[in-house]
Image (tube, coloured by chain):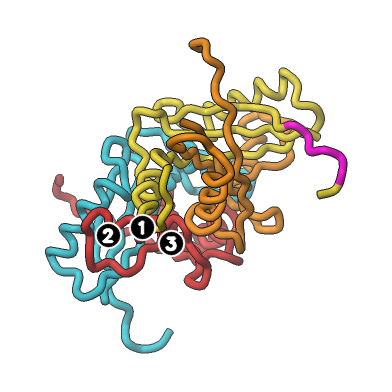
Chain colours: A cyan, B red, C orange, D yellow
Amino acid sequence: MARVVVDVMLKPEILDPQGQAVLTALPRLGVAGIVGVRQGKRFELEVDGEADADALARIEQLAASLLANPVIEDYVVRVEPAPAAQPR
Amino acid sequence: MARVVVDVMLKPEILDPQGQAVLTALPRLGVAGIVGVRQGKRFELEVDGEADADALARIEQLAASLLANPVIEDYVVRVEPAPAAQPR
Amino acid sequence: MARVVVDVMLKPEILDPQGQAVLTALPRLGVAGIVGVRQGKRFELEVDGEADADALARIEQLAASLLANPVIEDYVVRVEPAPAAQPR
Amino acid sequence: MARVVVDVMLKPEILDPQGQAVLTALPRLGVAGIVGVRQGKRFELEVDGEADADALARIEQLAASLLANPVIEDYVVRVEPAPAAQPR
């Protein structure tokens, strides 16, 4: 069992009103020193078996069709490192 | 300038209909081997200066109040490693 | 062809950080007189045929399983009135 | 006190992967007769006082800057009819 993460963000040149709302709210909350906020989507996929090249190719294709709209969004597919064996 | 990422996911015990929709759609798309999908939010924050302990404490507080609802969501705050110097 | 709309909002007793971010941002934008903001989801479904009782019952069930999480969200299913015949 | 609703949907010509995921999942759930699904955002704003022309003009401006990205999204601002007086 492996976990693959797909991060989806609006392309940098596309205005992100939700991130903008958070950024605009910061002074009122007394939070200084943050000069940009962007909000995107994060998908966590549980893969049955190993996250090998085949699995990643399938997820890459899935990301381009069902998780993101590549015309307006960028996405990154990556394997999440397995958590260490000890309990947390 | 540093980038801090806040990942927000519904707590594992809370049903996530959007992730469920993607999971249910997979067989129709011929995608096998994925047994779980969860959809959450990803925030990218640009910090003016270093992402030191102070900055992270402020962002931690922000995450708990304006980025996530801790009653139903888990969140993780982490510093994004700076991209390598060479162009991509 | 008929259009059915499903509105999904977090239950009133559940904190909505995204709506809160917009509300907190308002003074900075000089927008007065708004005392509450909630953000939810809106689904527009195109029904092949009439939106009769059968179709609405199916959509009601769909809303409860794939569009909303009834533990934390309320939803409303309603038929959108057809647009008037003249061009707009 | 009045309620104003702002519906935000991706423009029709822009692919909506989240709506597409729901649409693709339907056959697996045995739901027939739905030929299109689009997912957008719904904002509910509580206005202190009446939702008069002034208030609506402010909300219109807010929608265009902080609730929607007009380059990729359409939005509609409308006053929600007050609920009937009887208890539900």
Question: Residue D85 in magenta?
Answer: yes
Number of the front mark, 2 or 3:
2
Q: Is residue A51 above or below residue D18?
A: below
Asked if marks 1 and 3 fall on the same chain, the answer is: no
The residue where tag 2 is placed is: B27
Mark 3 chain: B
Q: Which residues are magenta?
A: D81-86
Kindly report the distance in space between the C-alpha atoms of the residues bearing marks 1 and 3: 49 Å
Mark 1 chain: D
Q: Residue B82: image x %, image y %?
A: 28, 55
Q: Residue A60: image x %, image y %?
A: 21, 54
The image quarter in which residue B34 lies: bottom left
- The reply to whether callout 1 and callout 3 are in contact (CB within 8 Å) is no
Kindly report the distance in space between the C-alpha atoms of the residues bearing marks 2 and 3: 45 Å
- The reply to whether callout 1 and callout 2 are in contact (CB within 8 Å) is yes
The residue where tag 3 is placed is: B52
Mark 2 chain: B
Q: Nearer the viewer, residue B15 or D37?
A: D37
Q: Is residue A75 above or below residue C31?
A: below
The residue where tag 1 is placed is: D28
Q: Nearer the viewer, residue B58 or A79?
A: A79
